[in-house]
Image (tube, rainbow, N blue to C red):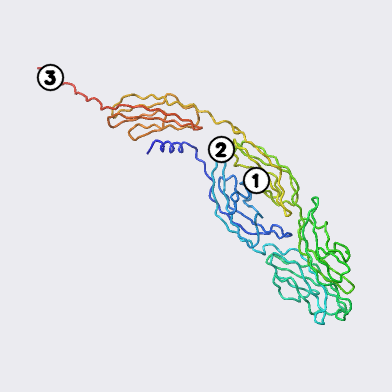
Amino acid sequence: MKPGSIAIVLLLAALPLVAAPGAFTLSGSAFCSSPNSGQPGVHLTWTTSANATQYDVYMASQEAPIGSVPAGGSNTFDTTYFAAIFQTRTYHLIAKDNSGGTSTSNSVDVFIPPDVCPPGPFTVSGNASCDSAAPAVHLSWGSSTQQPTFRVFREGSQISGALNWTNQSFTDGGAVAGRSYTYTVTASNASKSTTTPPLNITISSTICSGGTPPPGAFSASASPFCTNGTPGARVNWTASSGATSYVVNRNGAPVSGTLPSGATSYDDTAAPAGQSSSYVVVASNSAGSATATAGNVVPSCPPSAFSLTATAACSAIASPPLPVVTLDWSAAAATTTSYLIIRDGIQTGLVNGNTMTFTDTEAVAGQTYQYVVRAVGPGGNTDSNSVFLAIDPAICGAPPSCELSCAANVPATGVTGGAISFALLQAPSCSQFYVVWTFGDSTNASELAQTHVYTSPGIYQWNVTIVGSGGHSCTNSGTITITSPAPQIPPKRRVARH
């Protein structure tokens, strides 16, 4: 074995043994994080990793962790990060300890089905008409991303079969002129069922007798908007021929009052923020009405402005102590779903919308970092102020000094079979060090003072190396001549005289 290899082995043997984080198992499943908005999420859970102090959560498409969880808690993590129906996301965890040891979990694939969330609230709209000389009621309703099955009810009795989720209309050909009917539509998937508010339609007794026709068909749309931090929903529609007035309904109830015949838009500033609302526009005249479904809207604004501070400190619980950076920020808005931690332009962490602090345990003394926190909400993203933080190179103290001396007391000669003393004149002043003696005959030792026996005569080169904390080292060498011991002459025998 070479002296350098021996030195490494001896150094590792001299260091204290620290148990790395133990093996652990990860599992995951899809869940509905917000039934009102239909936002799916992924729920991760894992067994405990022995000796771990922190778990970092990774998604396969991301180089940086999307979140961190301190050890000793519930061993769970929920995320909506890139969660979308029909997608499969792959996750793994890395358990860390305070000494830099790690353990990686298994990877899990989580498929997010379309029906993980229940159908959101929606409304049905309709109008009466004369189809082929017979009265009929045409119904339509908003779409749903949760892929439910639709069923149409009249006066509480089902009048349609199970309609595919792509089918958003139905014609009731069994209506009778001069009657009023109440209609509802139920959307069902594996999660639950949602039923529209009742829609009342009165069919004129003269609907198929000529005269003034009811308003013509038209289309409508809805979109969110934000004004001075106040969210709302904007409803637009095309003109309906023959209409004398319009009414905008939200979730089955009128919210606009009666609008004139020339109106083509309405801003609902009282729409519930962060919740899905369904809009329908009703065009009316003396002969009847026509409806157009505008769709579902989640009114929301981007998170409000917020401020970030960053401080550096030395973590005493790490061995050896390491610098950490603590980020603290003010709350952005109640609708914030998560905060992304961005260091030098790269995401390094993620916390939920109720958390306003993060600890960066990967900072390095002597480096300067730029931190930004990004608030994420249904209405968009908002970044905090940018903070530059320079970490003091001596934040955890200067490395301990270590005085070394390789001056040694080694005789110049010796004999085979004799115990020869090899000793350092001065012990190192540092607490951690290792010593390697090599004696020139393919043997070595690691004590400050050592005896050695040579078995063959010759001239041998010895060497001593000391390595201390902080990488300090010294080396000394010399030669020793080994001879065979002088032969012993037996004493002469005295002859006795008589």
- In the displayed orientation, state which residue is furthest to the left: 498
Compared with 355, 168 (above or below) is below
Camera-nearest label, 2 or 1 = 1
Foreground: disc 2 or disc 3:
2
As measured in the structure, the alpha-carbon distance from the residue carrying label 2 to the one carrying label 1 is 27 Å
Q: Taking 220 as reference, is 110 left or right? A: left
Secondary structure under the numbered disc 3 in the rendered image: loop
In the image, what residue type sits under mark 2?
Ser
* Residue 67 shown left or right of residue 459 in the figure: right
Q: Position of residue 396 (x, y in %)?
A: 59, 33
Q: Which residue is mark 1?
A: 342
Q: The N terminus lies in which quarter of the figure?
A: top left
SS category of the residue bearing label 1? strand
Q: Position of residue 364 (x, y in %)?
A: 59, 38
Say which residue appears at 88% left-offset and 74% top-offset: 287
Q: Nearer the viewer, residue 243 or 148?
A: 243
* Pointer 2 or 3: first along the chain: 2
Position of 74 relative to 465 (above/below): below
Real-space Cα separation, disc 3 to disc 1, in angstroms: 104 Å
Q: Amino acid at mark 1?
A: Ile
What secondary structure is found at the residue carrying circle 2?
loop
Instruction: Give whichever of discs 3 and 1 has the lower sequence position.
Output: 1
Location of the C terminus (image quadrant): top left
Residue in front for this viewpoint, 212 or 437: 212
Identify which residue is drawn at 79% across, 79% down. 173
Disc 2 to disc 3: CB gap under 8 Å: no
Numbered badge on residue 319: 2
Instruction: Kindly indicate the quadrant of the structure image that contains residue 394.
Output: top right
**Which residue is identified by label 3?**
495
Residue farthest toward the bottom in the current orientation of the protein: 133
Pointer 1: residues within 10 angstroms few (<14), some, or many (20+)? some
